[in-house]
Amino acid sequence: MPLQVKPMLAATLLALASASAHAVTEITWWHAMQGALGERVNGLADQFNKSQSDYRVTPVFKGSYDEAMAAAIAAYRAGNAPHILQVFEVGTATMMYAKGAIKPVTEVMKAAGEKFDPAVYVPAVAGYYTAPNGDMVSFPFNSSTTVFYYNKDMFAKAGLNPDKAPATWQEVLAAAAKLKAGGEKCTYTTGWQSWVHLESFSAWHNVEFASKNNGFGGLDARLKFNSPLHVKHIENLANWAKQGYFTYAGRKNEPEAKFYSGECAMLTSSSSAYANISKNAKFKFAVAPLPYYSDEPGAPQNTIIGGASLWVMSGKQTEEYKAVAKFFKFLSQPEVQAKWHQETGYLPITTAAYELTRKSGFYEKSPGPQVAVQQMIVKTTAKSRGLRLGSFVQIRTIVDEELEQVWGGRKTAKEALDNAVRRGDELLVRFEKANR
């Protein structure tokens, strides 16, 4: 009996030693994707886990963007933050100034010995998440932008050319008038009113949304979206609302349902709505660039991103950061990015992924997603690079409140925008003082 025990004991010890030598490094990824997008996030993690045996990523759904961010802050204070956190674009400045809470992605990749070249990323995407010293602070993941959708069947019925989208806001008005005359009750609606009609609108027309290069130049940035051009645009929309050309249907993506249900003929919203519209629309539709004012110099320039990026939390072990770097390298692969872009409607974050998609013939079969890419793959300016403002989540809420006063006829466009700028600046002053 003793002669049998020793070989068994030796085998057990050998197995334990082998397991220890090849221990899998586990990292957690908190995200805000649910439904089909959540399934695709799980699929990405599973694909990475199966591609090698040293690291394992566990994705965890933590609610909406706001909820995931709040949960991560609480977890960081408690000493058990996730390794990776998905944060929406308006939380960028807040995360950057969260002292000691994050580890810049450039630093993570460099320490792990992984090649990381910001130049491979779409300029308008990379620029949004790049610090003044040129380092990328977070990893671009699900990036979207604002685009224009229209119902081709409704256009044809109204005597409009279904193969020609309105390119300017003047043409949108003309189309709306013809659609209404033809009996359509909802000619135009919009999702994400602040993002579309003030934030992207500013970049698209190459004008400032805020001073200091929209906040990239310092914490003392102040809001500037009450300029004559901004006032003119919101005033026009207010007049359209009175005439029955513009239907307000909610602050976020609620209006998208009015489009894909066939109720509204035209929609401005996120490029990421493409998959949902394609799935639900029972009519022919098309995607076109965001309209602009043809009498304004500098337009069109480029639109800015929405969506989110991945932030690396501090306080982890060296091997865990290596795992994060390996995962980010995996996510950057053109094949992975191209598949994510084609399945979700989000932008390909690298030019290589875009080229791979283009060469595959995907855009010939599904031309819609290419519109968003073309709006973004251009050289950005100081005014169109994006926005980096503290307390931006709260500022958006203020903008929503003030715009609703305009649509309801209770304030003029100038009164509302002046008030939004004043209220927003108060938040920026407080954020500046807290982070000096």
Image: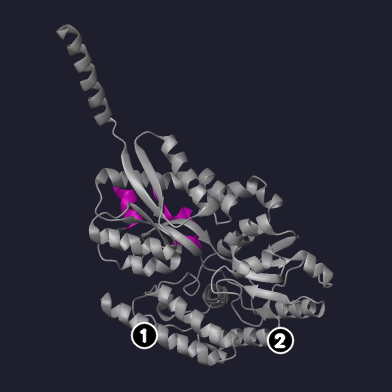
Image quadrant holding the C terminus, namely bottom left
Which range of residues does the magenta coloring cover? 104-126
Point out the frontmost of discs 2 and 1: 2
Give the amino acid type for the residue marked by disc 1 in the picture. Glu
Q: Is residue 153 left or right of residue 410?
A: right
Q: Where is residue 149? Give x, y as percent.
A: 67, 66
Q: Is residue 91 left or right of residue 247?
A: left
Taking the spot 24% from the left edge, 26% from the top edge, the residue there is: 16
Taking the spot 29% from the left edge, 31% from the top edge, the residue there is: 22
Residue 193 colored in magenta in the image: no
Label 1 packing within 10 angstroms: few (<14), some (14-19), many (20+): some
Taking the spot 51% from the left edge, 59% from the top edge, the residue there is: 143
Report the disc number at residue 243: 2
Disc 1 designates what residue?
426
Residue 21 position (above or below residue 67): above
Res. 279 in view: yes
Tag 2, which secondary structure? helix
**Residue in the foreground of this view, choosing between 379 and 250:** 250
Label 2 packing within 10 angstroms: few (<14), some (14-19), many (20+): few
Tag 1, which secondary structure? helix
